[in-house]
Image (cartoon, grey):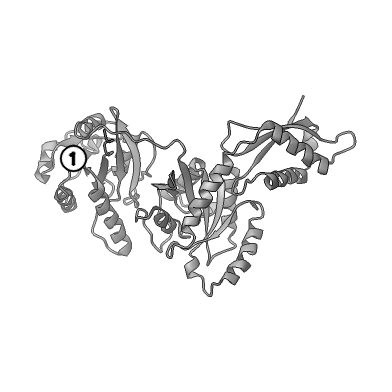
Amino acid sequence: MAQQKVPIVAIVGRANVGKSSLFNTILNRREAIVAREAGTTRDSIIARASHKSKDFWLVDTAGMKDPEDDFEFTIQEQITQAVSDADIIWLVLEADLPITDEDRRIAKLALKSRKPVMLVVNKLDKAPRADLADFQKLGVKPIIGTSTTQNQGIQTLLDELVANIPKASIKEAPDRIRVAIVGRPNVGKSQLFNSLSKKQQAIVADRAGTTRDINRSIIRYNGREIELLDTAGIRRSGRIERGVEKFSVLRALSAIEQADVALVLMDVNELNVQLDQKIAGMVKEAGKGLILVVSKWDSAEGKTAFTRDELAPQIQQEFVFVPWAPLVFTSAVTGQNVTKLFDLVVDIVARRTQRISTPELNRWLRKTTDTHPPAGLKSRTPKLNYIAQESQTDMPSFKVFGSHTKFLHWSYKRYMDRKLRETYDYAGTPVKFWYIEKH
């Protein structure tokens, strides 16, 4: 029997009616940013949800309103697409406010889609005596009252939903690869995200700070599932505003922690920025795979292969602390080297998960230390006796047992890293050595 299609539930409504709060309450985690500021959500955020053994995709959308400019038009177009893709629509209103013309327009749009629509009257905690019958004039049934702050009506809403959707399950591939796209604001992260996912899911605009939540897209490439995580731009600490922007930066850091590989984007027109190096350092410290991506190559004036050959050594010199990270020049507009990023990601993940037998590692250790023994102090010369690969870590990690290891010079540790990479291909990923006293 064919597997049932997993239904999609889209949450729509005016700005600041509590759509993201409802989204987070059902997921039981802070997935979307919630703030008192209207219009906090800009991209459509999608996440897996489940109730009574029935899985469904839950989509949080931006507040609907008349578009005032091209940027706002893009947001509204994205909402319309979410409604079109949905199997069920939740129209969210506020219990403590009368029905507005905007509510009527959104209800008309939802009903016009000919999809099942449920009216969610939210914020009952602010209007405990509200009469839900007053909302019947919108012509949407059923009507369910909720309060996300008091968890009121949520079970009723979910029970009503699962009574009208088929039983389906979302099965995540056990070898799914997660890729975080990170960088400063306005370096082209969302544009690359859209190019990689082949659809207009993240909003692309010339203004900085467009993306706030973690935007996700799952694709298949050469038989592998790859989950892309588009993030908000990371600013210098002193320039991060309180509130929504601070949450956005925390989301970006969270995406790095969730990822297997991070793409650190740099604008070709704004190279040699210290913050780019800091972000790459954050990825290294998190123990994640790393690809340095020079974006917007199509916009570089007078670009030639010679220009790229000149730029590459300069950039690599700035990122000398991650000499193992591949450097790629891309253009999301023309598609240049976009597919190459997928190939690199798959290769890096394969290297991160490769296992080296203990006997082979110890042959390598003997050869490495015989060729260049570690130096030390008088009667305090380090001796490295035994090495084994860690099995319970996400990044390639090795325990090295010996005596006087605390006197091992940092330059020798770097030598060990370099010799390991010369023998075993660990391009694109940091490697960790633990030096342990054998006694």
Left or right: 437 with respect to 270?
right
Quarter of the image containing the C terminus? top right
- Residue 326: image location, x then y, percent: 59, 54
Query: Horizontal placement of 138 versus 380: left or right?
Result: left
Give the labeled residue for mark 1: 118
Image quadrant where one finds the N terminus: top left
- Residue 375, by quadrant, is top right
Residue 262 in view, yes or no: no
Q: Position of residue 396 (x, y in %)?
A: 61, 39
In this picture, residue 419 sits left or right of residue 90: right
- Picture coordinates of residue 338, whole percent (x, y): 47, 58
Q: Few, some or many C-alpha atoms within 10 Å of disc 1 (few <14, some 14-19, many ≥20)?
A: many
Vertical placement of 324 versus 296: above or below? above
The image shows residue 78 at horizontal and vertical percentages of: 29, 54
269, above or below 243, in the image? below
Foreground pick, 194 / 387: 387
Which of these two is toward me, 383 or 258? 383
Q: Residue furthest right?
A: 378
**Furthest-front residue in view?**
1
**Count of numbered labels shown in the rendering:** 1
Depth order, front residue of 159/414: 414
SS state under label 1: strand
Residue at the image position 48 percent from the left and 69 percent from the top: 299
For badge 1, the amino acid type reads Met
Quarter of the rendering containing residue 285: top right
Question: For the point 43% across and 65% down, which residue is it?
Answer: 334
The outermost residue toward the bottom is 302
Residue at 10%, 44% in the rendered image: 139
Q: Nearer the viewer, residue 369 or 378?
A: 369
Can you see residue 160? yes
